[in-house]
Amino acid sequence: MGYLRWCWEGKSRGARAEVARYVYSSIFLLTNFLAWLVRDYSHNALAKLHYLKGCKGGQDCLGTEGVLRVSMGCFIFHFCMFITTVGATKLQEYRDSWHSGLWHLKGLMWISVMIMPFLFPPAVIQLYGEVARFGAGIFLLIQLVGIVKFITWWNDRWMSDDTGRCRAAAIMVSTTAYSASVCGIILMYIRYAPKASCSLNIFFVTWTLILLQIMTGISLHSKANAGLLASGLMGLYIVFLCWSAIRSEPIMDKCNPRKQATGKGDWINIVSFIIAVLAIVMAAFSAGIESRYFQFSKSELQSDDDVPYGYGFFHFVFSMGSMYFAMLFVGWNLHQTMEKWSIDIGWASTWVKIVNEWLAAILYKAISIMPMCISLVFACASNAPCEFRDMD
């Protein structure tokens, strides 16, 4: 213990902050698995609590309420951390010490807030569940902005290379992305829209194909701030969202041949579940340290004393992520019974992913055509003919 304490305290403040985000992510991962255990294996224990016996749906609703209570505890923990660390800019501040240290105190705090929601009446938990839908939507929006910004940054970085080596790699990656997108659309038509009666799936896949074509057309426009690499990666992303949305549909004989979940935990369901949980944690981890994407003014680190990332934003993302994992575990439906080892299944989940796909395409298009709009505004403001002109 003394050696470990020496190793921890011997680190610089910046290094401690970097390590702290991995600790918080590990706690978040532990909370996700705790919510899973409560949902799938704690019905008998929850039924002994007298204030849960009258919850809507009887025995079947206990798992959902348990997930919401675990999620609420996680939300309270990170929201309290958000309030106490927001605005921290320097490593010498007490808020940095609170974020990056005092783990014994925060451990007791985490245990306390995880127990606290199990003392609340069902009405409070149902109200939290309704609010959690909104918070989960905020998390999805933050994640979406981060993905679009990263893809555009990747495109600009490689396409601006004068040596040509990155340009060749960009062409190869974009070609692969487009090929995978087209193959994915074809496979979705074959597997999930085999008959004309599968009209909803046909609509989902066809509209995804149209969005892919529109994004490609914008990228080919000479005045657009885009490239084939960005549109190819975004196209692959929206195809993935479409596939994920269709996979979230309830089991149907003809239009969704996905195997009916038995709740016995076969290895495919177990692996899929674990990957989904890890994806939730990685999404919160990556979005939490990208506060610069949401700043209105560009600011770089001025000195070594500046915090390496926004502590307040980091905990805000994790607090919204707490609501997000609750919605995935209950299928965005507060009164739905989920099978064991299942996650994000139901019509509500399907439509959330489809709307997320459409928002991703709209956001990418808005970022791509922004230079064209600015060029038009400058042309009109200078009393010149209102036509697109290069910003150079």
Image: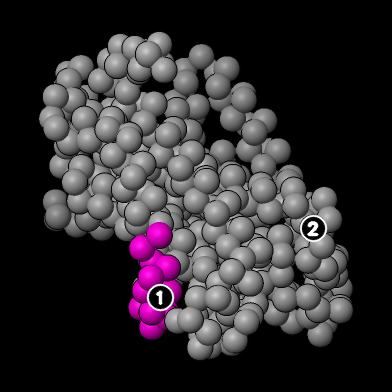
- Pointer 1 with pointer 2, Cβ within 8 A: no
Q: In the visual, does 234 lie left or right of 124?
A: right
Q: In the visual, does 229 lie left or right of 310?
A: right
Q: Which residue position holds label 2?
A: 265
Residue 125, numbered circle = 1
Q: Residues within 10 Å of mark 2 (few under 14, many from 20)?
A: some
Image quarter of the C terminus: top left
The kind of residue on which mark 2 rests is Gly
Q: In the visual, does 157 lie left or right of 82?
A: right
Up-down: is 267 above or below 334? above
Range of the magenta residues? 115-130
**Secondary structure category for the residue under label 1:** helix
Q: Residues within 10 Å of mark 1 (few under 14, many from 20)?
A: some
Distance from Cα at disc 1 to Cα at disc 2:
29 Å
**Secondary structure category for the residue under label 2:** loop
The kind of residue on which mark 1 rests is Ile
Up-down: is 194 above or below 227? below
- Judging depth in this view, the residue of 360 and 322 nearest the camera is 322
Residue 155 percent location from the top left of the image: 49, 35
Residue 245 percent location from the top left of the image: 65, 66
Q: Residue at x 62, y 71 (%)?
A: 43
Image quarter of the N terminus: top left
Q: Residue at x 26, y 47 (%)?
A: 81
